[in-house]
Amino acid sequence: MFLFPSYRHQSADSIICSKKAVLLDCDGVLYKLGNALEGAAEFVESIQKDKRVFFVTNSSDASPDHLVSALAKIGITATPDQVLSAPCITARVLKRRGITKVFLLASHNMVSQLRAEGIEAVVPDPDMPVDMLGRTHFPDPDVQAVIAGNTTVFNYSIIAQALQYLVRPGVAFIATNRDAVYPGPYAPLPDANSVVAALSGCCNGRQPELMGKPQPLVFDVLREEFGIDARDCVMIGDQLHTDIKLAKNGHAASLLVLTGVTPPSEWRSWVKASGIRPDAVVGGVSDLKYWRRTA
Ligand SMILES: [Mg+2]
């Protein structure tokens, strides 16, 4: 176990002991490319006995049911209400703002999540001829926001359709997340930021409002729906700019694990370069399975 130099007085175990809720990133923390990381199931089982546990991921595909079944495959028992993915947070925030219809440029899994919150999603037609835009029924006058996330269905016509909404006064531009890449089976693949950048590029650089990590909206949901304050939470993640920054933005505690994107040999230089300082650094959740030893 490695402890960040400024926090030697406080071990990762004692941080977990002192908190009511544990927020877990998934990819790079519990599994990697669908394969369980060492100690993941044992650690989650042990903390579920005493702590509120939530799975906080930026994955655009992470509908609650989808993530629960992915976790079950690696021996982790979870329920859909423990999943606070970027699409889940987006749907809740939209509902709170009274938005009832959106143009959805993200994973189709989000259609059902939005519907569960009473929000209708208009999805793009990749084959719509662009020279007809503006002449037909398109765009839908009731659409209040364009939602950008990770999607594999994306082309010039779809960018053009989104543009018809983004140029209309009052239509919000929202991103589920802005991750650059995610790990594919054989190589890194483009994540939501490629979609966001394409839309920004045709809207004079207009930037979306971000819903997922590191934006601390998840803490609003935890407080309002579960009565949990951010200061009673510890976030465990493998990425400084999303997971650890989320904790910093929300004033929660943070543990960095080195089983994901942050290499064990470079975490010190990455922390120094980013200025994002986790409260503790551990090799992986396998180092945390005996967290009760300091209780
Ligand atoms: Mg991760």
Image (cartoon, rainbow, N blue to C red):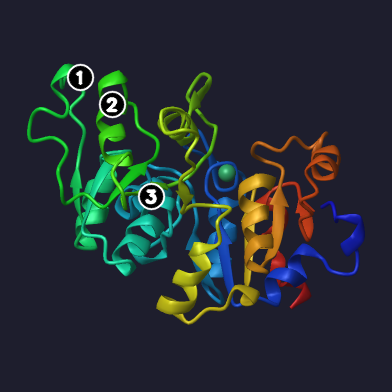
Say what amino acid the circle numbered 2 marks: Ala
Query: Ligand 1 shows up in which quadrant of the image?
Result: top right
Left/right placement of residue 220 relative to residue 289 reads: left
Using the image as rendered, state which of residue 289 and residue 114 is in the foreground.
114
Q: Residue 130 carries which label?
A: 1
Crowding near pointer 1: few (<14 within 10 Å), some, many (20+)?
some
Say what amino acid the circle numbered 1 marks: Val
Mark 2 near mark 1, Cβ–Cβ under 8 Å?
yes
* Label 1 secondary element: helix
Q: Viewer-nearest of labels 3 and 1? A: 1
Relative image position of residue 201 (x, y in whole percent): 46, 28
Q: Residue 91 carries which label?
A: none
Q: Viewer-nearest of labels 2 and 3? A: 2
* Label 2 secondary element: helix
Q: Disc 2 and disc 1: Cα gap in Å? A: 7 Å
**Badge 3 is on which residue?**
67
Q: Disc 3 and disc 1: Cα gap in Å? A: 36 Å
**Badge 2 is on which residue?**
160
Q: Quadrant of the C terminus?
A: bottom right
Give the residue at x 38% y 56%.
Answer: 90
Relative image position of residue 108 (x, y in whole percent): 25, 39
Give the residue at x 65% y 75%.
Answer: 231
